[in-house]
Image (cartoon, rainbow, N blue to C red):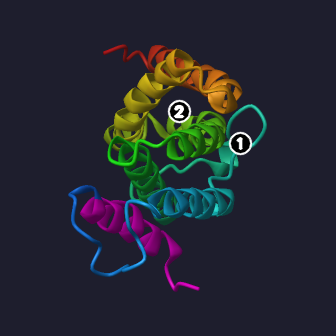
Amino acid sequence: FAADPLELLSRAAEEWLGELSDGSKCSEQPFLTKATAPHYVRVLFSALLRQVKQAQLRPVRGGYAASNLATDPEDETLQRNVATLQQLLGIFVSLVLSTRSFNSKMVISTVIRESCTFLSWFNREVLAFVSAHFKLVPQQMVGLVKAVQPATRVLQAQCVAVKQRAQTSALAPAARLKLELEKIIYQIKMMLQENNCRE
């Protein structure tokens, strides 16, 4: 139990795994070692996906109803949603980047499979949210899109590596993940075009 699960997840993904990746032991988590890190990554991804399900971005089929759109850049619900998304994306990126230090087959398989689920949500709900509020708060919306880029680069490389290594258990999830990565690029291009902003 945690009073603020996102804050705890942020610390675990960014601080604890980060401390371990530097080669030293994690002072706060004595059971977190290079050997147990794959299990931590799997549990943290599961916890992240539970938090994703609780994120209330108020999407509707085909986009956002006019009644669900903020009209004021300082709207409390809008700013709360942006802050939540920043945290969720930060945790996701930290978990994906941790694979550079814990590059085992188990970690790669877990990250590819769970990233597919996360990016499916990102494509379906986050990009709809970004598109709906792009004109109101463009800098914040661009910031959300840019926040996920470090992870997508690593994931693209991992999809290629899985294929080269013939890591059979991860081939099907890697193919689905590649599709989600392609959807991100397509949807962002469409969104920028709709908003007359192609840079």
Vertical relation: 154 (above or below) 136? above
Label 1 neighbourhood size at 10 Å, few (<14), some (14-19), many (20+)?
Answer: few
Overall secondary structure of the magenta section: helix
Q: Is residue 186 visible?
A: no
Mark 2 lies on residue: 131
Mark 1 lies on residue: 65
Residue 122 is marked as none
Residue 114: percent from left, percent from top: 61, 45
Residue at x-position 46% and y-position 28%: 158
Residue 36: percent from left, percent from top: 47, 64
Residue at x-position 67% and y-position 42%: 66
Residue 82: percent from left, percent from top: 45, 54
- On screen, residue 78 versus residue 150, left or right, reads right
Mark 2: which amino acid? Ser
Instruction: Give the structural element (helix, strand or loop) at label 2.
Output: helix
Q: Residue 5: say if magenta.
A: yes
The answer to which of 132 and 188 lies nearer the viewer is: 188
Residue at x-position 71% and y-position 25%: 172
Mark 1: which amino acid? Ala
Quadrant of the snapshot with the N terminus: bottom right
Q: Is residue 84 visible?
A: yes
Q: CA distance from mark 1 to mark 2?
A: 13 Å
Instruction: Give the structural element (helix, strand or loop) at label 1.
Output: loop
Vertical relation: 148 (above or below) 5? above
- On screen, residue 129 versus residue 36, left or right, reads right
Residue 179: percent from left, percent from top: 63, 20
Q: Residue 8: say if magenta.
A: yes
> Which residues fall within the magenta stretch?
1-20
Vertical relation: 112 (above or below) 165? below
Where residue 136 sits, quadrant-wise, is top left
Residue at x-position 47% and y-position 65%: 76
